[in-house]
Amino acid sequence: MTTVILGAGIIGTSTAYYLSQSQTPSIHLVESSPELFASSSGYAAGFLARDWFALASASLGRLSFDLHKKLANEHDGHKTWGYARSTATSLAETIGGGEEEDWLGEGSSRVKAAKKIAENDDTRPVWLAPRYGKPDIIDKGDGTAQLDPFELCHYLMSECKSRGVRLHQPAEATSLTRDPSGALSCIHVRNTATSEEYDIPCTRLVLAAGAWTSQVFQKLFPNCKIQIPVSSLAGHSLLLRSSRWPPPSSDTVPPDLNSIHHGTDDSMAGAKTQPPCHALFTSDPAASYSPELFTRLPSGHIYLAGLNGPYPLPSLPTERIIDPEAIETLKRTAESLLGKGEFEVEREALCWRPVTGRGVPIVGPAKNKRGEGEQDVWIAAGHGPWGISMSLGTGYVVAEMVQGRETTADVKGLQL
């Protein structure tokens, strides 16, 4: 059995990672971008949550959160890709809504997806401008965490290659072939840098091309009766450094991430060790958007985003054109929240997140409920702003699907 995965972002690479743990035949990743992780896989916030999801994706969200924690504990993730527990806080005056509310489409905050608000305590981001009071606490770090997605992607890719996964980049799939019985046999690929064309044996196909997934599907299956309802939502971001948020010394980040707690462990009774990172959700009525800020370790960065817009999807993520007006809006928000002159901008970015009209991802076979679709083809896309958070869980269950196993998470509500 040979599996070809189209798209080597966080979802495709996670699928290859878990598939390569137990599948000995070959696995191929095909990536069209000349730069790896050039869209949301490398430029997203990296915020993780365990229970901020709609009912259809709740099981997948829990599995993925637990897999992120397990992977970080077993492979030094707090140093390699900055995994850390994180408080989730809000400066919004009112927090409402429920899991059915389309907060993303409205341009409001993802904090609306949180299940409950904990009581306030003394936790306050040290980098928050002094004129602001204490934020409301959504999660004290038991069900939220933070990481650097670019570093996590590179770790997963390195592991995949060490296990024999083949990366074809930059390359695009142009067509596929089925044998007389209708089973997949090979996929035709073109190296876009050299124009070399060649075939890859293919008996299982996974489409995980992010915001480009529907385009790839239509190209390969022009006569298929089903549509893949994945579109794109563009978002700008800034990577900042603040004079009030230096990277803490290494001894403040324990090797065992489970030991970061709030005094509930008998071995440190009475202690009150806060998680080292913060996530801050707020609103900017003047700019009509909902800023999100996340601190990262060990780099000491602060990530600011939340400003989305109808920027057209380019052919490749490296063809992005950053909107200077959007960047100026983000900088004004940074001045308000961090203080004028209290930060430096290290990176300006624009990426495209894959979204669906239902607000939940598509994870399952490329067939609808009537059985119409394509045999031996799976779709894993449309995660919106939760692509990093749900990445490991998605990769895990798609690997199970490809191998014909029952999925660990209930993803029946995420299928076409």
Image: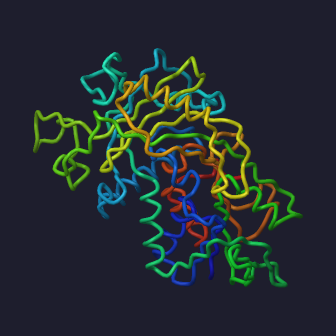
Picture coordinates of residue 148 (x, y %)? 41, 51
Is 256 situated above or below 269? below
Instruction: Please tell me how many numbered marks the rendered image carries.
Output: 0
User: Image check: 73 left or right of 284?
Assistant: left
- Identify the residue at the far right of this view: 223
User: Image check: 143 left or right of 76?
Assistant: right
Residue 402 occupies quadrant: bottom right
Residue at left 65%, top 40%?
Answer: 359
Residue at left 60%, top 44%?
Answer: 384
* Color style of the picture: rainbow
Is 124 situated above or below 234? above
Query: Is residue 242 visible to the viewer in this orientation of the structure?
Result: yes
Picture coordinates of residue 324 (x, y %)? 61, 36
Is 236 situated above or below 8? above
Is 155 situated above or below 299? below
Picture coordinates of residue 116 (x, y %)? 43, 26
Residue 309 occupies quadrant: top right
User: Image check: 326 left or right of 251?
Assistant: right
Could you say which is closer to the camera, residue 371 or residue 104?
104
- Quarter of the image with the N terminus is bottom right
Query: Is residue 48 visible to the viewer in this orientation of the structure?
Result: no
- Identify the residue at the far front of this view: 341
Picture coordinates of residue 6 (x, y %)? 66, 67
